[in-house]
Image (cartoon, coloured by chain):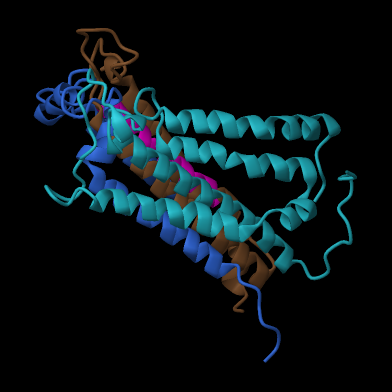
Amino acid sequence: MRPLSVVVRTGCDFFAWFMIVFGVNIVLHGYMTPGGGFQGGAIIATFLVFLLVAYGGKKVLSWANETIYEILFEELGLLCFFILAFLGLNNSFFYNFLAVPLGTVSSGILSIFPSSGTTALMSVAVGIEVTGALSLVILTMFKGIRLFIQNPPEEELGHDR
Amino acid sequence: MKKTIFIVAAIILGALVCGALDNIHTFGEPGKTPMDDYFLANSLKTLSTENVVTSIVFDYRGFDTIGEAAVLFTAVCSIGAIFREGRGKH
Amino acid sequence: MIGNAPFFAVGVLFLMGLLGIFMTKNLIKIAIAVTILGSSVNIFLVALGYRTGGTIPVHFLAGEGTTMVMPTPQAMTLTAIVIALATTALLLSLIMLVWRHYGTIDVDEIRRLRG
C-alpha cells in the first residue's frame, strides 16, 4: 500500500496524541456541554487511525496489543454500565441514587462524584466501551487485508522510520 | 430500457415522498409536546443535569441505551469471527 | 410551501441514495449509497423537532427564560447513528469476503460465476 507524503505523515504523527486529550475532555464534561459518551469514544478511536497513516501497517500491528483493547476497554466498560444500572434496585431498575440538588455541597466520600449522579458516571463507562469497540474494528479489518493477499510484499515502500 | 423505467419510477416516488413530507406540520411549530415539556422542566430540578439530551439518553430513556450498547458489542464480536485465520489443510 | 425547505432537502437526499443503489455496478459504491440513505433519515429526525426562535437545549449555554427546541429527536438520532455504523461495518466486511472468493467486485460478474 503506497504511503502519503512526508508532510501528511509528520502532521498525523504529531496530532495523534492531541486527539486523546480532546476526546477525554468531551467525555468527562458530558453532563454540562454538548457531547457525552458516544461522541467522545468515537474521537478517541481515531488515535489508531492517525498512527496507521504515519507509521505503516507492520509497525503498528506489532506494537498494538489486541487483548488490552478487548478486555480492559470494551468488556470492562459494558460491565461497569450494567453494575451502575443494577445498584439502584432498592427503588427501581436504573434509579439515580447519587443525584443531589445543585446547590448543596456534600462532604465526605461522596463529594468526588458530580452532583448529577449516575448520569456522568454512565457517560464515562460508555465512552470507554465505544473506544475499545471501534479500535478493535479498525485493527481487525486492517489485519484482515493481509490474509487475503497470496504473496505479500516484503516491506512497505516509503515508511522508512 | 430497464434503466429508463427505473429512473421514471424513482422520480415519481421522490415526488410522492416530497408531497407527503410537506403535510406533516409547518417547519418550526410542532404543536403540543407534553413529554418534552416535562423533560425540560424537571431535568435541572430533579437530576441537576444541565445537558438535557444526556439526561434523556442515560436516565429517562436509559433502556434504549442498554440495547444500543448490546448491538455495538454484537457487531464487534461478529466482525472478529469473520476475520479468523484458517487452521491449514485438513 | 417555501418554508418547508429542510423537508424537501431530505426528500432529495433520499432520492439520490435510492438512485445510486441500482445505477452503479461497483459494490463499494452501493455501500456508499446505502450510507447516504441512512443519513437522510437522521437529518429528518432532527428537523422534526425544531421550534421557531428556540436555542440549544443545554442550560449551561443558553440564557434564562428562553424557549428550547425539542430534545427527544436528538437523543433518538444518537442511537440511530450507532446502529447505522454497525450495519456499515458488517457490510464492508462481507464485501471483502466476496472479493476474496470471486476475485472481482462487479455485480454482473458475480452473478455469472457460481463459485
Judge left or right: residue B72 versus residue C4: right
Q: Quadrant of residue A55?
A: top right
Chain that is coloured blue in the picture: B
Q: Is residue A122 part of the magenta span, yes or no?
A: no
Judge left or right: residue A100 versus residue A6: left
Q: Position of residue A44 (x, y in %)?
A: 55, 39
Judge left or right: residue A49 versus residue B45: right
Q: Main secondary structure of the magenta part?
A: helix
Tell me the shade of chain A. cyan
Judge left or right: residue A110 versus residue C115: left
Q: How many marks?
A: 0
Q: Residue at x 52, y 55 (%)?
A: A72
Q: Position of residue C96 (x, y in %)?
A: 62, 62
Q: Residue at x 48, y 50 (%)?
A: C21
Q: Is residue B13 above or below residue C43?
A: below
Q: Is residue C47 part of the magenta span, yes or no?
A: yes
Q: Which residues are magenta?
A: C30-48
Whether residue C24 is visible, yes or no, is no
Q: Position of residue C92 (x, y in %)?
A: 56, 56
Chain that is coloured brown in the picture: C
Q: Residue at x 34, y 37 (%)?
A: C77
Q: Position of residue C63 (x, y in %)?
A: 28, 7
Q: Is residue B63 above or below residue C16?
A: below
- Residue at the outermost front position: A108
Q: Residue at x 35, y 13 (%)?
A: C61
Image quarter (top left, top right, bottom left or bottom right) of the C terminus of chain A? top right
Q: Nearer the viewer, residue C55 or C28?
A: C55
Whether residue B61 is visible, yes or no, is yes
